[in-house]
Image (spheres, rainbow, N blue to C red):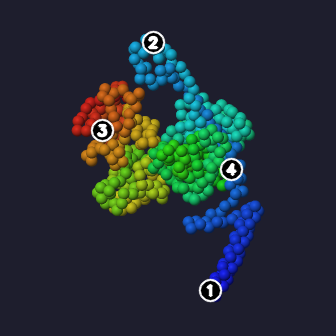
Amino acid sequence: MRSLQNNKLLRVLAVAMVLAIMAGGWILYGLEKANQAGVEVTTASPVSAQVIDQSKITAAAKKAMPSVVAVLSTKEVTVSPFGQSPFSDDPFFRRFYGDAPDQQRKRPLHGLGSGVIVRQEGGEGYILTNAHVIAEADDIKVTLHDDTELKAEVIGMDEGSDVAMLKIQADNLPVLPLADSDKAEVGNIVLAIGSPFGLGSTVTMGIISAKGRADVTITQYADFIQTDAAINPGNSGGALINLDGDLVGINTAILSRTGGYQGIGFAIPSNLARRVMDSLVKHGEIVRGWLGVGIQDIDDATAEQLGLKDTKGVGITSVEPGSPAADAQLQEYDVIRKVNGKAVNSRRALVSIVGIKEPGTEVELEIQRDGKTRTVTVTLGKRPADLAERGPDGATEILSGVYAGDITPELRGHLQLPENARGVVIVKTDDEKMESSVPLQPGDIIIAVNRKGVTSVEQAQKAIKAGTRDKVLLLVKRGSYNTFATVKK
């Protein structure tokens, strides 16, 4: 009896499995037919549901690909037949092989990247790319989608945002429209197009993983879009597009421990690229917004002293007389929390937000002063030309080959500075450019310039500028000792 019941149960289960398989097949067949008919099909997941439309992805790629070019930069470098041999300076070695300087030869050094055609005026086309793609190049050529090779001229570049603009002589170019990158949202599907490893017209797909990445130490002025669309060497300067086939960003860099793609890439937003492009065309350079304040990040100890509940925001340490900040009556010890409603949680973020805006722009600052929240409207000025450009690490070249920064909690920890350190800290040096009576090194603290005490980069720059000689006297603290250093401007 038990055996018969078991047999019946097995037959019922078998029939149920067959019906389930048939039902699954009908569902898959229906989905395939719907896709072929151009019907949007929604697939649900535990995290989210998103619309998949293959035809839209294909159409976007076809629209944008002709506008993306390969950029080949060439720089002549001088090499010695001795190379890096340890015997290259040995007199005995040179007796037999001659002097290296007399046998030096030049050879071309090539770099490969991508670019995007964004403007056509008469018989001239304009291309956006990355500044690092064409930096120090002696010759630049671009290869169009149809394999036409053209010589390119540099209109201008902005190392602060890593944006450069090229010009070529050509008609009827496929111009790629620029989208409003502010409207792009996290989760949007995007395509990255470029020439990775020299493979032109390569398309990869992903989503926007994050926006507003201003604290990534790639450039000084940026508000990066983060994406998981594959960006590999050679993709720099290429296009990040939305599903309308419009330019959302310029692919710039990857975050990787291996040098290859690991799922985290960064693109310069199209709105920033447009701003740089317009400024380069109009002024031949990028003009930046300026507040006129000294700032630093807030640590726990500072937050407690200022009566703050957390470390969010950026503290004002000084206000430049006659600056936009002074006109708006900003004060030392004020803490800037937001700019135009957008939270600002680091010095780098504030520098980026202000620096990418046009002078004359009004911005609304939310500040905290003496425990109370206030709103202040500031009209940005033009960043003074005598303020040197800062590199990705936030350092300013105050003297030839000497890069320094204000002592911030990050630098204090990174360079292991004592808690009572005061002055301007040297972040890095370029030994080929620097001419100093005493070798300077990262971690050295400049206490005084030309006998005048300094506590900020701005003060150091003013003291250096005020000097009438071509050399500057520094009082430098290293560890527990002070020393004089005479450095050429």
Q: Which residue is mark 2?
A: 96
Whether residue 283 is visible to the viewer of this picture, yes or no, is no
Q: Residue at x 67, y 83 (%)?
A: 8
Residue type of the residue flagged with mark 1: Arg
**In front: 464, or 310?**
310
Q: What secondary structure is marked by label 1?
A: helix
How far across and down, in percent of the image, does residue 400 sit? 40, 30
Q: CA distance from mark 1 to mark 4?
A: 64 Å
Which part of the image, by quadrant, shows the C terminus?
top left
Q: CA distance from mark 1 to mark 3?
A: 91 Å
- Give residue 199's quadrant in the image: top right
Question: Furthest residue to the left?
Answer: 480
- Give residue 70's quadrant in the image: top right
Q: Are marks 1 and 3 in contact (CB under 8 Å)?
A: no
Residue type of the residue flagged with mark 4: Ala
Mark 3 or mark 2, whichever is nearer to me: 2
N-terminal label among 1 and 2: 1
Label 1 neighbour load within 10 Å: few <14, some 14-19, many 20+: few
Mark 1 or mark 3, whichever is nearer to me: 1
Q: Which residue is mark 1?
A: 2
N-terminal label among 3 and 4: 4
Q: Which residue is mark 3?
A: 445
Q: What secondary structure is marked by label 4?
A: helix
**Does residue 63 appear to the left or right of 223 in the view shown?**
right
Q: CA distance from mark 3 to mark 2?
A: 48 Å
Q: Residue at x 40, y 60 (%)?
A: 374
Q: Residue at x 66, y 66 (%)?
A: 42
Q: CA distance from mark 3 to mark 4?
A: 53 Å
**In front: 408, or 27?**
27
**In front: 483, or 272?**
483
